Amino acid sequence: MPVCCPTKLFMKQDRILIIGAGGQIGAVLTEALREVHQPDNVIATDLRDLGEQEGPTDVLDALDGAALEALVKKWRINQIYHLAAILSANGEKNPLWAWDINMRSLFNVLEISRQRQLSKVYYPSSIAVFGREASHFNTPQYEVLIPETVYGISKVAGENWANYYYRRYGVDVRSIRYPGIIGYQSMPGGGTTDYAVDIYHYAVQNKPYECFLSAHTRLPMLYMPDAIRGTLELMEAPSNRLSVRTSYNLAGMSFTPEEVTASIRKEVPAFKITHKPDFRQAIADSWPASIDDSAARNDWGWKPEFDLDAMTRDMLFHLAAKYQVENVRAPMQ
Ligand code: VAH
């Protein structure tokens, strides 16, 4: 079943290592990469055993540079997708631990990529790189970056290291500043935008949901199929088309808990929500409400396909199957 890319980009003989393949994006990206490449050429790794999959898996702690080098040699890797990170909310519970994990794992990836001249590296960033000093609406690609979370600080540093390894050593590192990502295939972990996933799991079971953000908190968001397709399109773009080597702004939609609730109620009229803002409200308030992704559109033809109602229909349809709920409308065609 095509995860995101109705048209196969093309089959290639690259050998790809995915770090953090058990995470919210990593799990879906692994499946999508195995649709484009030979499944046996996509090696999924995580801290924990990933169990049986369509392609090879391995256990990897990305903080262990020697272990990473051993896997790159063992599987004859020429591309790394580094999806492991401590996200915004969890990072604030243990700042120096989050910094260490996010940075040491990146340095291991960049160094092994430099030493073994890997062909491409994918390193996700986030709109968490922006703080209150940035333009709040339609935040531009080049903007002052004063993040208020350790996660955001690590992503600003990471973007600049990626740019450095590209310009100094020619390592072809590519990056996207993901907004909040919403999908039915996997659960998020430790983020501030996780409410936008949790709400659908409660709604499809017609359970009341207590939202940890206030009703009017507007944040940039992106549906998983769009996020995955955008990532693959960036990775397949000709290198000479890419003008941004820190990280590309990417946007899909921008909504508040109140607006996603209204969208859900078109399908689940009885859905109830309450709001009990916690420490994540301050994080969300420091982020942009919407993002200008014109650089991605100009450089590699980025264009989102899902709006809020289309995402709602798709999320509820797939989650209805998971929870064995009936009478949920099929997704919009
Ligand atoms: C987080 N989901 O909430 C991540 C993301 C823009 C938010 O980076 O931390």
Image: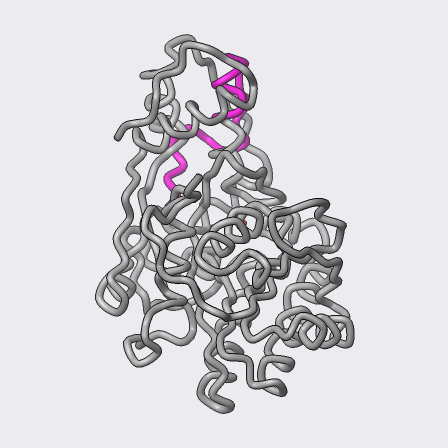
Say which quadrant the C terminus sits in.
top left
How many numbered marks appear? 0
From the viewer's perspective, is 136 left or right of 175? left
Residue 85 vs 208, above or below: the answer is: below
* Residue 271 locus on image (x, y percent): 44, 13
Magenta stretch, residue numbers: 200-220
Please indicate, yes or no, whether residue 131 appears anywhere in the rendered image.
Answer: no
Q: Which residue is nearer to you in this view: 266 or 185?
A: 185
> Residue 203 colored magenta?
yes
* Residue 313 locus on image (x, y percent): 35, 25
Q: Residue at 39%, 23% (x, y): give it.
A: 261
Residue 196 vs 221, above or below: the answer is: above
* Residue 143 locus on image (x, y percent): 34, 67
Say which quadrant the N terminus sits in.
top left
* Residue 306 locus on image (x, y percent): 30, 39
Colour mapping used in the image: one colour
Q: Residue at 35%, 56% (x, y): give it.
A: 250
Q: Residue at 38%, 32% (x, y): give it.
A: 216
Q: Residue at 58%, 41% (x, y): give it.
A: 188
Quadrant for residue 62, please give it: bottom right
Please indicate, yes or no, whether residue 226 appears anywhere in the rendered image.
Answer: yes
> Residue 137 colored magenta?
no
Quadrant for residue 114, please give it: bottom right
From the viewer's perspective, is 189 left or right of 70? left
